[in-house]
Amino acid sequence: MNIDDLVLSRAQKGDPGALDAILRHHYDAIRAVCHRIVINSADAEDATQMALISVARALPSFDRRASLSTWIYRIATNAALDELRRISRRPIPTEDSALEHTQPDATGEVDARILITHALGRVATEYRVVLVLRHVADLDYEEIASVLDIPVGTVRSRLARGRAQLSEIVGNQFPSPTRHNSADDALPPKDGRP
Amino acid sequence: MNNDELDPTLAQAMRDVPPVDAAMRENHIAAAIEQASTSTFTYATTSSRRSIGRSVAVAAAAIVILVGSFALGRTTASDPVAPIVTAPSTSIPKTALPTCTDQFDGDAELVHTYEVNDVEFAVVNANGETIILETRSCSYITHFTPRAD
């Protein structure tokens, strides 16, 4: 039994120190998934909290059929989608105000984080989730299919459509600030098309 | 793994989420660990509207139950001192109540149970009247006759 298995076993038996170690180890990944799916920062923090609670509560029943990280990503994704459902009556904020006040710096670049947040907020949720699991969580197609309980073929098609949407939005919405002086380094408008 | 189909700059921007506040991280983890060992729901986030909503709903339900039980308790108790009222029991004694309701001629229907000072009472509709029984002994406490308007 390696150290990871030992920590997991102890956490599953109720050792708070082991549980703390597991939550701490996966915290950034959970939070990144929640932020990129939920978009709005405050709501994403709520989703992060809910995901952590769900992990802590469900860990004793984790059966190890999937890897721990895949299992945790599934919980984080569900928490984020739950949060989206909860806030579905209001539009998804995309930090427009921050974008409006963002000016190109000396090299003509704008904050890529704000741009991508803005763009992701406009990608359809079902495509955005797959994009996030692929490019933020770094899961392969089979893992994404497992997390979302959908066929691998559906993962592929959603990824293709998601990338197309994202590229189109980035290209249409922010062409000038990212192209001023360093088009090669900025967010390319069309290169990401499948 | 390959990100060939998405521009690396775009992919990197997706991974670059806003930095976490250290205190919030500690609160998140502490709350999750607490949840693992207790059934009490606590919520340490930037927004607590979910827990507030839940608390309000629970409080409202408790008030409705408390007021209803209290009114019923005052009606049935001869002691002028208000009884200590607890939330009504959802568990209906499976042996006592059929026996209790059997004592009435005609149909008798259990409507509700509630507790006052750890003594369980049942509200039964029988023969057009509302009857209060003490469930353990099936003792008759009182009854109400609908007012003829």
Image (tube, grey):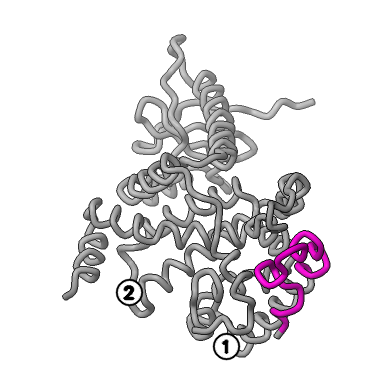
What residue do we see at 54% from left, 32% from top?
Answer: B59
Which residue is the site of mark 1? A152
The percent coordinates of residue B41 (x first, y second) are: 43, 43
> Which structural element holds mark 1?
helix
Relative vertical location of residue A177 with respect to residue B136 in this rendering, above or below? below
- Quarter of the image that includes the C terminus of chain A: bottom right
Q: Is residue B125 above or below residue A136?
A: above
Residue B100 in view of the camera: no
Residue drawn at the location 35% of the way across and 56% of the way down: A23
Q: Chain of mark 2?
A: A
Q: Who is closer to the viewer here, A114 or A80? A: A114
Of all residues, the one furthest to the bottom in this rendering is A153
| Residue sitting nearer the eye, B128 or B115 | B115
Residue of label 2: A63
Badge 2 and badge 1 both on one subunit:
yes
Amino acid at circle 2: Asp
Mark 1 crowd level (few <14, some 14–19, many ≥20, 10 Å Cα)? some
Q: Nearer the viewer, residue A49 or A132?
A: A132
| Residue neighbourhood size for the residue with mark 2, other residues' Cα within 10 Å, grouped as few (<14), some (14–19), many (≥20) | few
View extreme (left): residue: A1
> Answer yes or no: do the residues labelled 2 and 1 have beta carbons within 8 Å?
no
Badge 1: chain ID: A
**Is-magenta flag for residue A178?**
yes
Q: Please indicate whether residue B51 sits to the left or right of residue A69 in the image.
A: right
State the mark number for residue A160: none
Residue B100: within the magenta?
A: no
Indicate the amino acid at tag 1.
Val
| Magenta region, residue range | A169-193
Distance between the Cα atoms at labels 2 and 1?
A: 23 Å
Predominant SS along the magenta part? loop
